[in-house]
Image (tube, coloured by chain):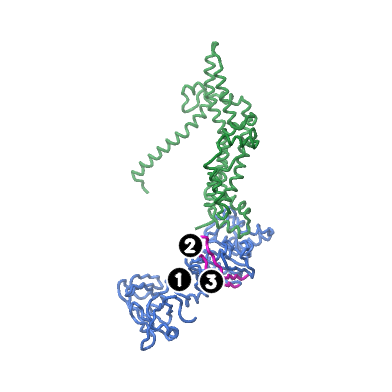
């Protein structure tokens, strides 16, 4: 079909706007990457725009000088892996059960979940609860948690709308129990939503920072995010305490200040790189049309 | 193999709607029974109650002499083929068929043998390693049938299994299912809304409407002697023609006087049971093939009407005619004569094939 001139204008404007959006979103990420490996002075003066200048790994070297960063990585990986597993183990079966219309007490249960979406206990009561549960300064505080009502609804909806009832009926007639229906029919067909939920929760755990700040004192249990924060704070305070009285000291202090800036970029990269690397492996599960061929009509 | 007996089975939903109303029927061992009716007539609900997928509100269902009211689907020794196939999309054809057998702990060797046999019967031999998404509609439905036959159940239940297939495939599968029935000799209960399927496949047809059985009889019987106006109008394409009128006594005997005018002499066979209806209203029904074809005898029973729509089918023509009171009639005639819409025609009615219905109860008059 031949495009009319209005179609061409529409397409051009569309493409232009989309390119603009891409630039707005991608450039900051790109800038972080190049700024972290550029000469701090060049970054500070604003001459780093499109490519790194005066290539240096000083910022990274400074960040990795701190040994706690490895403990942080270790802890965060544990929190993310175990925490995500825990989330999925609670979320998926709960959503499956809630997707069954014949579940006794389904309405009451739904409300039970809904209430938690609207009302929370608040920070201090929650802290006191965690304290009496003995979870302060424990790895479990970073792992355990409730089921998010929002995710529950999303997954429940997936079970209801994607997997046809007649599939379960066929399984029942074939002799499957409720558990067998779940493990052998529902679970394999829920891979895409499980992948999405795994990614959601993994990113949440990876970036989790606030809970650690509230509940964890022991530095050996610090997640990566908290370690990185400390590194930044430390370099700033060190900078503030320098007394500029010697010859040449001024120049050194200024350089340290620039370096602190560059370290910020390096930490951003360090914190997000593992997630960026992991994403393509999860992506293959984001497949469309798991149900193709199963049912018709 | 087993018979299936339903006694006074009712299905009432929580909102009070009555889906199935006192359904009683004995389905013989090895019978091919077809349940047919318009959407919402309760045919699928009845089938699902036999399967155990739907609870029954009252009555009893027996399979092979055992009451199964409280028996879960898996222990009823039935297999069901769904309208939408309901294949397990993540399993191969082989695994789809083997799933039920594996769950029942049947030895692997036996499973292999049964699945391969079913695959052979259904012509799925080369497709056993494929996933459902790699199959055509007809092949998928065959897998669904295969999944049923490997289980060697006492009773097969089919819920509109062919309605998602294209016309050509449907004709093919129809024959295949008949052959399968002959081969297995199992009891089969088949739900459809397609009367061609019902007429061609069923040993017996059960016509349902509004949750109740309207007639249960052999296909030819249902066509020839429908029990009431609903069945008469539902079975047969184009449907039966109906004329409202009164029964009157005339010099030569009884006659039916349609509201649209004319006088149609009643045959002596019909006159016997129409005697009590003299002077009363009744309903005349005749198939399209009983209208418009000139017979050598040339009976004096003719109807006047205006040609409205002409549908040439090739080997025959359907002519829709509107009578003076606006009743629409369809004539099934030979392809020779030309019909011009708008012209008035006088059509002969073959009264020997006509049926009479009570005007109020709409039941057919006379005995079988």
Left/right of residue B315 with respect to residue B200 in the rendered view: left
Q: Is residue A253 magenta?
A: no
Q: What number is the disc on residue B166?
A: 2
Query: What chain is colored blue?
Result: B
The span from disc 2 to disc 3 (Cα, nearest Å) is 21 Å
| Residue B132 percent coordinates (x, y) | 56, 55
Q: Which residue is mark 3?
A: B202
Q: Earlier in the sequence, mark 2 or mark 3?
A: 2
Q: Which residue is mark 1?
A: B234
Give SS at disc 1: helix
Q: Residue furthest bottom?
A: B251
**Chain part drawn in magenta:** B1-28
The span from disc 1 to disc 3 (Cα, nearest Å) is 16 Å
Prevailing secondary structure of the magenta residues: strand
Q: Earlier in the sequence, mark 1 or mark 3?
A: 3
| Residue B151 percent coordinates (x, y) | 63, 63
Q: Is residue B11 magenta?
A: yes
Using the image, determine if residue A119 lies above or below residue A235.
Answer: below
Same-subunit check for callouts 2 and 3: yes
Give SS at disc 3: loop
Q: Residue at x 36, y 42 (%)?
A: A8
| Residue B337 percent coordinates (x, y) | 35, 76
Can I make out residue A245 in this image?
A: yes
Q: Colour of chain A?
A: green
Using the image, determine if residue B229 lies above or below residue A182.
Answer: below
Q: Earlier in the sequence, mark 2 or mark 1?
A: 2
Q: Nearer the viewer, residue A250 or B24?
A: B24
Q: Nearer the viewer, residue B35 or B123?
A: B35
Q: Nearer the viewer, mark 1 or mark 3?
A: 1
Tell me the crowding category of disc 1: few under 14, some 14 to 19, or many 20 or more residues within 10 angstroms, Cα based: many
């Amino acid at each position: 079909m031949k495009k009319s001139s209005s179609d061409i204008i529409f397409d051009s404007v569309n493409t232009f706007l989309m390119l603009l959006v891409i630039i707005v979103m991608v450039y900051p990420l790109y800038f972080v990457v190049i700024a972290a490996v550029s000469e701090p002075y060049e970054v500070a003066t604003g001459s780093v725009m499109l490519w790194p200048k005066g290539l240096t790994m000083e910022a990274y070297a400074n960040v990795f000088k701190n040994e706690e960063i490895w403990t942080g990585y270790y802890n965060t990986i544990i929190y993310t892996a175990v925490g995500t597993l825990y989330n999925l183990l609670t979320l998926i079966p709960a959503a499956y059960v809630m997707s069954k219309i014949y579940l006794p007490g389904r309405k009451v249960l739904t409300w039970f979940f809904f209430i938690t979406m609207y009302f929370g206990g608040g920070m201090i009561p929650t802290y006191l609860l965690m304290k009496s549960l003995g979870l302060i300064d424990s790895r479990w505080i970073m792992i355990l948690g409730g089921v998010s009502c929002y995710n529950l609804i999303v997954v429940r909806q997936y079970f209801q709308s994607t997997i046809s009832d007649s599939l379960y009926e066929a399984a029942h007639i074939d002799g499957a129990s409720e558990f067998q229906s779940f493990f052998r029919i529902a679970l394999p067909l829920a891979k895409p939503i499980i992948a999405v939920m795994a990614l959601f929760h993994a990113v949440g755990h990876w970036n989790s920072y606030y809970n650690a700040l509230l509940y964890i004192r022991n530095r050996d249990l610090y997640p990566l995010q908290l370690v990185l924060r400390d590194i930044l704070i430390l370099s700033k305070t060190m900078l503030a305490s320098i007394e500029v009285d010697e010859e040449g000291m001024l120049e050194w202090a200024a350089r340290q200040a620039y370096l602190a800036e560059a370290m910020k970029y390096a930490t951003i990269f360090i914190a997000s790189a593992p997630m960026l690397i992991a994403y393509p492996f999860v992506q293959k599960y984001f497949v469309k049309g798991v149900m193709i061929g199963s049912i018709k009509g | 193999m087993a018979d299936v007996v339903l006694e006074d089975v009712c299905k009432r939903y929580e909102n009070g709607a009555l889906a199935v109303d006192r359904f009683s029927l004995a389905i013989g061992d090895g019978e091919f029974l077809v349940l047919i009716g318009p959407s919402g007539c309760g045919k699928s609900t009845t089938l699902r109650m036999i399967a155990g997928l739907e609870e029954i509100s009252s009555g009893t269902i027996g399979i092979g002499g055992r009451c199964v009211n409280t028996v879960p689907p898996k222990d009823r020794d039935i297999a069901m083929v769904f309208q939408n196939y309901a294949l397990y999309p993540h399993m191969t054809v082989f695994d789809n068929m083997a799933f039920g057998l594996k769950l029942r702990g049947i030895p692997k060797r036996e499973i292999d043998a049964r699945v391969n046999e079913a695959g052979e019967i259904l012509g799925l031999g080369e497709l056993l390693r494929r996933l459902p998404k790699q199959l055509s509609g007809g092949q998928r439905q065959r897998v669904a049938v295969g999944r049923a036959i490997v289980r060697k159940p006492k009773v097969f239940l089919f819920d509109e299994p062919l309605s998602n297939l294209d016309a050509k495939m449907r004709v093919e599968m129809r024959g295949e299912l008949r052959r399968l029935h002959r081969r297995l000799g199992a009891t089969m209960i088949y739900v459809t809304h397609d009367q061609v399927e019902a007429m061609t496949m069923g040993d017996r047809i059960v016509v349902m409407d509004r949750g109740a059985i309207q007639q249960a009889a052999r296909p030819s019987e249902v066509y020839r002697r429908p029990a009431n106006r609903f069945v008469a109008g539902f079975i047969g394409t184009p449907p039966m023609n109906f004329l409202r009128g009164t029964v009157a006594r005339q010099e030569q005997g009884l006659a039916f006087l349609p509201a649209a005018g004319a006088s149609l002499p009643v045959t002596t066979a019909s006159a016997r049971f129409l005697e009590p209806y003299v002077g009363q209203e009744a309903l005349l029904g005749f198939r399209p093939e009983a209208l418009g074809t000139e017979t050598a005898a040339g009976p004096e029973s003719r109807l006047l009407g205006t040609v409205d729509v002409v549908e040439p089918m090739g080997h025959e023509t359907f002519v829709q005619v509107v009578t003076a009171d606006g009743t629409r009639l369809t004539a099934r005639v030979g392809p020779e004569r030309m019909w011009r819409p708008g012209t008035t025609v006088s059509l002969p009615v073959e009264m020997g094939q006509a049926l009479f219905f009570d005007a109020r109860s709409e039941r057919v008059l006379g005995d079988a």
